[in-house]
Amino acid sequence: MARTAMLAALADILHSHAALSFNVNNFRYQIDTNAKGSLYSVSDGNRKLSYPLAWAFGTGRVAQSYLFKKEDGGFYEARVTYFTHLANLDFTPARALLSPSGVEEAMYRPVPPAEVQRCFACHSTASIIGGRFDEQQLIPGVTCEACHGPGANHAKAVDEPDAGKSSPVKSAIFNSAHLAPADAVDFCGACHGSWWDVKLAGVKGVSTTRSAPYRLVTSKCWGQKGDPRLTCTACHDPHKQLQTEASAYDQKCLSCHVNSTGAKISVSRPGAPCPKAVKNCTTCHMPKINVPEMHADFTDHRIRIARPGDAFPE
């Protein structure tokens, strides 16, 4: 998470791909990078526009998108994104435009100030001070205070003589681990896609797989109020690199499910045993789903018995 936003001039992906290009009909998209930075250009054969990229969003594990500025000082979203699976450019998700009115529309989408704040709020730290967006003082990427809030009082409390004997240390900092399950998932969903985010945006089909919190709460085992064993941080430690091996999550699954046919379910372990296996549970019950506009597969967090040929469950 610490690398979810960076100045484009510091983006390793761009520096390792000095020349990127993408052609659609008579439009040619290019990003050329050298020691001075990255220049984004679009031409239609007769006219060409170019602007230096300002910000890069995304670690590049799946993709990386870009913002630039024009003379008016506003932010503009590049119409193309770098996709790791392609090792090249393609249309930014949900921004495909096959018949633009001209080079300007082909090149970018103006980003309203409110959306700029939302983008940087999730991809950086302390980007909004006193209710105002502060591009100069923000910290690129998600650092401690992005999730835990201001830490000055916490640090001060740690230095107190009785720091190990009383509660001021803990109370001086926000910890999402103390939230109720539904609130905890919504907390992560604020950036990763909550139930309301997906519904209000009108996203449907396999594209919803990108919003793990939304998919999680549609699981049958989530229930009405959720279960602390099913929150995002119950399986993922935000302080560590994401585990991608299925076996890494087996113990999480077996904290709810009994693991043998002879074992009895209980209040604490209400999940019936799986008749197929007791390891690599997520390979069957949280299958990988291809999201075409991302050119990548995403783990579907809607926990279920996924049978071959089943329609994607909405």
Image (spheres, rainbow, N blue to C red):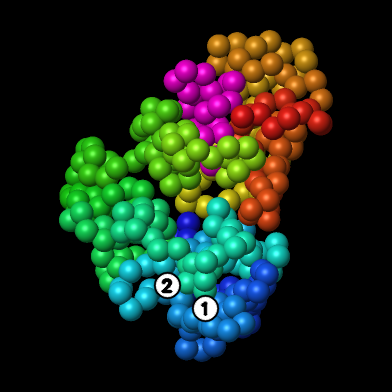
Left or right relative to 79: residue 205: right
Question: How many other residues sit within 10 Å of disc 2, few (<14), some (14-19) or many (≥20)?
Answer: many
Magenta-drawn stretch, dominant element (helix, strand or loop): helix
The residue identified by callout 2 is 68
Q: Quadrant of the C terminus?
A: top right
Identify the secondary structure beneath mark 2: strand
Residue drawn 48% across and 45% down?
192
Residue drawn 34% across and 65% down?
139
Q: Is residue 127 magenta?
A: no
Residue drawn 80% across and 20% down?
275
- The amino acid on which the numbered mark 2 sits, given as a three-letter code, is Phe
Q: Is residue 227 above or below residue 170?
A: above
Q: Is residue 214 above or below residue 54?
A: above
Which one is nearer the viewer's eye here, 307 or 264?
307
Which one is nearer the viewer's eye here, 84 or 106?
106
The residue identified by callout 1 is 40
Q: Is residue 268 above or below residue 2?
A: above
Name the image quarter holding residue 197. top left
Residue drawn 52% across and 78% down?
40
Identify the secondary structure beneath mark 1: strand
- The amino acid on which the numbered mark 1 sits, given as a three-letter code, is Tyr
Name the image quarter holding residue 16. bottom right
Mark-to-mark CA distance, 2 and 1: 9 Å
Q: Start and end of the magenta stretch? A: 211-234
Give coordinates of residue 203: x percent, y percent.
Answer: 54, 40
The answer to whether residue 194 shows anywhere in this view is: no
* Sequence-first disc among 2 and 1: 1
Give coordinates of residue 219: x percent, y percent.
Answer: 58, 25
